[in-house]
Image (tube, helix red, strand yellow):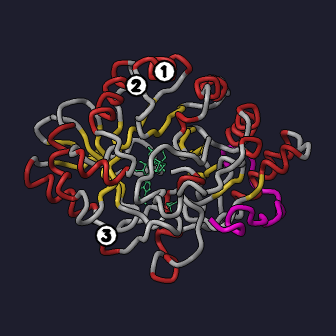
Amino acid sequence: MSDENRSGAHPPFTGPRPNRGADLRDTLGRPLRDLRISVTDRCNFRCTYCMPKEVFGPDFAFLPHEQLLTFEEITRLARAFVRAGVRKLRLTGGEPLLRRDIERLIEMLAGIEGVEDVALTTNGSLLTPKKAAALKAAGLRRITVSLDSLRDEVFMALNDVHFPVRKVLDAIDAAAGAGLSPVKINMVVKRGVNEDDILDMARHFRGTGHVLRFIEFMDVGNSNGWRMDDVVPAAEVLRRIHREWPIEPVPPEQPGEVATRFRYVDGQGEIGVIASVTQAFCRTCNRARLSADGRLFTCLFATRGHDLRALIRGGATDEDLYDAITRVWSGRADRYSELRGQATVKRPKIEMSFIGG
Ligand code: SAM
Ligand code: SF4
Ligand code: SF4
């Protein structure tokens, strides 16, 4: 990642005083409801579509520990975000379970008045039954485990650290055993790589109570060599599944949901598709992202963030933090996926492992 991307000076926290609290809206009328918190930029996987080894090699400079937000700083910021309308928090990364004592952070976040949901996305590699129970006890409500194939040769080539499928399946069992069900399973689908696993994955998770979600391969960051030809459109995934097991749409539970939901007509459960490339959902996007070093990004494809850590460490009051967040949100005009094209793909962007998926 270039220095410009990493340290990019933020636009000033200026502008007219916006609406307050839950009435806060961005320039396109979208409220702020969801905050994704990246707790580390490190990961023990090198998924080719996210942290390819050629870029994230042994010499890659990850953030030094003192640059990461502390749990206390994250909690203080989260409180300000909740005051600005956020109801759901999701911990991500990098690999969030690499952050020591993450349960302590979950407990702190779950204790914030107004927080309705604390969730976490993980590659499952460190999710033992003991860890799952500890996360649940700390107040975690939901968990998403990523798994792209049931075939070791395919999965190991994708995670690029030789991590076996069995261990991720065990992690999913551990999560369900701890009461974190329904467990969501994220599968990134890449043309010619794991598209043949779509039906196997669907078959495996049908009837288990888990919800498999197919994600279109996205052009996040600058290092995954994205090409439109590598995207398997969600409509195609759905057609393939429907031919085998008829499905029907399920209405969204809440506005701004990223996954479009479907259920098997034979009652064997639910699946979802995240069609961020072929069916952009910017119009309802109510998500903000906090990077591991404390910058606020208002879009997954943003080029620059707003440095909240500098404010916190510079002695800002809670009111100052709230003010900064509401000013940034009220000036937000992001709709990258709706505008996606050859020109936008080439724009410098923040890596997903840094900003939080
Ligand atoms: N390490 C954790 C994990 O893999 O679940 C959390 C962070 S990861 C960045 C969050 C999600 O983003 C994962 O489900 C991953 O598969 C997905 N992801 C990463 N790169 C992607 C890409 N280029 N396109 C679509 N999804 C991607
Ligand atoms: Fe790590 Fe998750 Fe990115 Fe894979 S997708 S490299 S597990 S952060
Ligand atoms: Fe939201 Fe940006 Fe994704 Fe659009 S491209 S849905 S604005 S994160």
| Residue positioned 37% across, 43% down in the render | 146
Span colored in magenta: 1-23
Residue 15 against residue 69 in the figure, above or below: below
Where is residue 85? Give x, y as percent: 65, 43
In the displayed structure image, the side of residue 13 where residue 31 appears, left or right? left
The N terminus sits in image quarter: bottom right
User: Seen from this angle, which residue lies furthest bottom?
Assistant: 343
Q: Which residue is mark 3?
A: 230
Where is residue 105? Give x, y as percent: 64, 28
Q: Are marks 1 and 2 in contact (CB under 8 Å)?
A: yes
What's the distance in space between the residues labelled 2 and 3, CA to CA?
Answer: 33 Å
Where is residue 241? Give x, y as percent: 15, 52
Within 10 Å of the Cα at label 1, are there few (<14), some (14-19), or many (20+) other Cα atoms? many
Q: Are marks 2 and 3 in contact (CB under 8 Å)?
A: no
Where is residue 212? Give x, y as percent: 28, 42
What's the distance in space between the residues labelled 1 and 2, CA to CA?
Answer: 7 Å
Report if residue 298 lies within the magenta region.
no
Q: Earlier in the sequence, mark 2 or mark 3?
A: 2
- Residue type at mark 1 is Lys
Image quadrant of residue 204? Answer: top left
Dot label at residue 136: 1
Q: Which residue is mark 2?
A: 180
**Does residue 273 show up?**
no
Report if residue 17 lies within the magenta region.
yes
Q: Earlier in the sequence, mark 1 or mark 2?
A: 1
Element at badge 3?
Answer: helix
Q: Earlier in the sequence, mark 3 or mark 1?
A: 1
Frontmost residue, 12 versus 330: 12
**Does residue 289 show up?**
yes
In the displayed structure image, the side of residue 180 where residue 16 appears, left or right? right
In the displayed structure image, the side of residue 332 where residue 167 appears, left or right? left
